Image (cartoon, grey):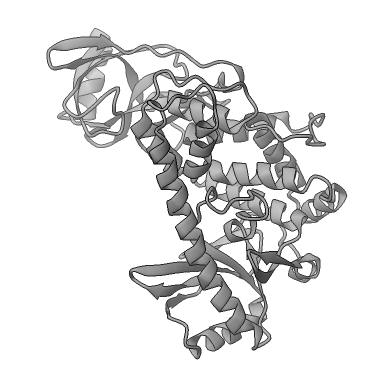
Amino acid sequence: MNSRVDTVELANSVLETRGKCELKCIGMSMYPHIKDSDILGVKRVDRLQVGDIVVVERGMDQLEAHRVRGITDTGNAIARGDNSFGLSAPTGQERILGKVTYRKRNGSVKKLQFEEVGEIFENVFILSEDLFMIRQLSYSPPPSAGHISLTRLAAKAEYHGIGPLLFRLLANSNNINETIVPASLFKQVYLSTKRQYKKHYKCLSMIISTLESSGVEVIVHKGMAIASPVYGDIGVRPMVDIDLLVRPRDTQKLKMVLACSDLPLSDFQHDGFTFGDRSNRCLVDLNYRLGGKFEQTGWIPVLQQEMELDEIWARSRVEELDGIKARVLSPEDHLLHMTLHSLAHIQEGRARLIWLVDIQKCIEASMGHLDWNLLLDVANRARFQKELLAFLLMVDKLLGIQDLPLKKEQSYSSLTQEYMLLVLALL
C-alpha cells in the first residue's frame, strides 16, 4: 500500500520533530486492515516487533505501509502486504520511518494492535487464514474456524494449489459446519481439478505414444507423476502444466518428431511448448537437467554441482499412471528434485504450500522403500545435503511427516529456522 507526500524528507522531518504524523494511503495491499483512502497514524519506535505495520521508504516520494513478517539476525525487517504475494528485500532500520498505530476510516478511529501467534510461529506474523491452512494440512489438533474469511481462504488456497485438498479435509472435519465451508464449494473445486487432470492426462498420453515409436524417452515428474500414485485421488492435486525431463542429446529429435506429428502443438520455446488450442490447451514444461531452473536470462544453478543425468535415468522406472505406462523418477531423485524446485522458488520470493505438501506426501507414500542412504549420498555429491536435510526438517516441523527418520537430527536447526521464516513470511 503506497502513501504519497510532497517528499519523503517532509514525512521524516515531521516525525523527527513531533514523533508522529498522519499519512493518506493509496492501494489495497493491506486490505482489509487498511484500504484505499484510509488515514494512518504513524509514530517513531525504537524497537520493531513481528506483526507491526510499518511505513517504509521505497523510493523518491513513495512510502509503503507493510506488515513485518520476520526480522533477520542482523535486524533487517522482512515486510509484505497482507493482501499480496511475494516479499520485498529485507529492509534496514534506517529506511523505516515508523510504526502504524491507528487508522481513520469514515470518521472513526481504530487502533491497530496485533499479537504474535506463538509456538513455531513465534518469529513471524501470519494471518488467521494462513494459520488455519497450515494446521488443517498438518497433524495438529483440528483448527478453529473463528475469524476466518471464506472468500480470502478460498483465494489463498487456490494460489497455494491446495484448494481441493483443503476443502476435502474440511468437509471430513467434524468441527467445521456447512456455513463455514459449503459442500458445494468443495464439490466445485474438486470437479474442476479432476477435469484439469484428465485434460493433461490425455495430452500426456498422446505425447508419450508419439515419442515412443521414435525412440525418444521422457521422464514425467512433479504433479502428473504423483497425483494418482501419491494422493490416491486425481481430484485433489491441481496442476498447471506437464513436466517432462528430456536427455539434452534428444532435444532436437524430440522437437522434430513432435513438429512432424499430427498433434496440435505450438509456441515452441527452449523450455517448453503448448499442446492444444486456446480453448483446450496444456502447457508442457521441458527440463534438460535437475539442479537449477531456466530463466530468460539463462541457467540459474541451485546446486554447486549438477546431478548426474545418466545416473538419474538409470534409477528411473516405468510405472502406470492411470492406465498409461510412463517413465518416472526414482523416489529418491524425485524427492531431491522437489526440494530443489521448492527452495529455488522460495529464495526468489515465492512459496506455495502444495510444494511442501508434495514432499510430505511423497515421503510418507515411499517410507517403506525410500533409500535414505542413496538419497543422502546423491545430495552429498551434489553438495546439497545440508540444505536437503534442513528443508525436510522444516517441512516436518511445519506440516509433520509421519515416521520421518531424521527427527533426531539437530545439526541444521539454524538453517531449518531460516527456511521456516522465509516460507511463513511468503504465505
| Vertical side of 47 occupied by 225: above or below | below
Give the residue drawn at x 55%, y 32%. Answer: 172
Taking depth in this image into account, of 320 and 295 the one nearest to the observer is: 320
Q: Where, quadrant-wise, is the N terminus in this rendering?
A: top left
Q: Residue 143, percent across and down?
A: 53, 22
Give the residue drawn at x 56%, y 71%. Answer: 204
Give the residue drawn at x 50%, y 69%. Answer: 284
Q: Residue furthest left?
A: 107
| Vertical side of 98 occupied by 225: above or below | below
Left or right of 4? Residue 408 is right
Count of marks, rendered view: 0
Taking depth in this image into account, of 141 and 83 the one nearest to the observer is: 141
Q: Residue 305, percent across and down?
A: 72, 59
Left or right of 305? Residue 375 is right
| Vertical side of 286 occupied by 339: above or below | above
Q: Quadrant of residue 276?
A: bottom left
Q: Quadrant of residue 218?
A: bottom right
Determine if residue 415 is in view.
no
Taking depth in this image into account, of 249 and 158 the one nearest to the observer is: 158
Q: Residue furthest bottom?
A: 260
Q: Residue 191, percent across and down?
A: 45, 51
Taking depth in this image into account, of 58 and 7 the one nearest to the observer is: 58
Give the residue drawn at x 22%, y 14%. Answer: 21
Q: Residue 212, percent across and down?
A: 65, 83
Left or right of 183? Residue 201 is right
Determine if residue 368 is in view.
yes
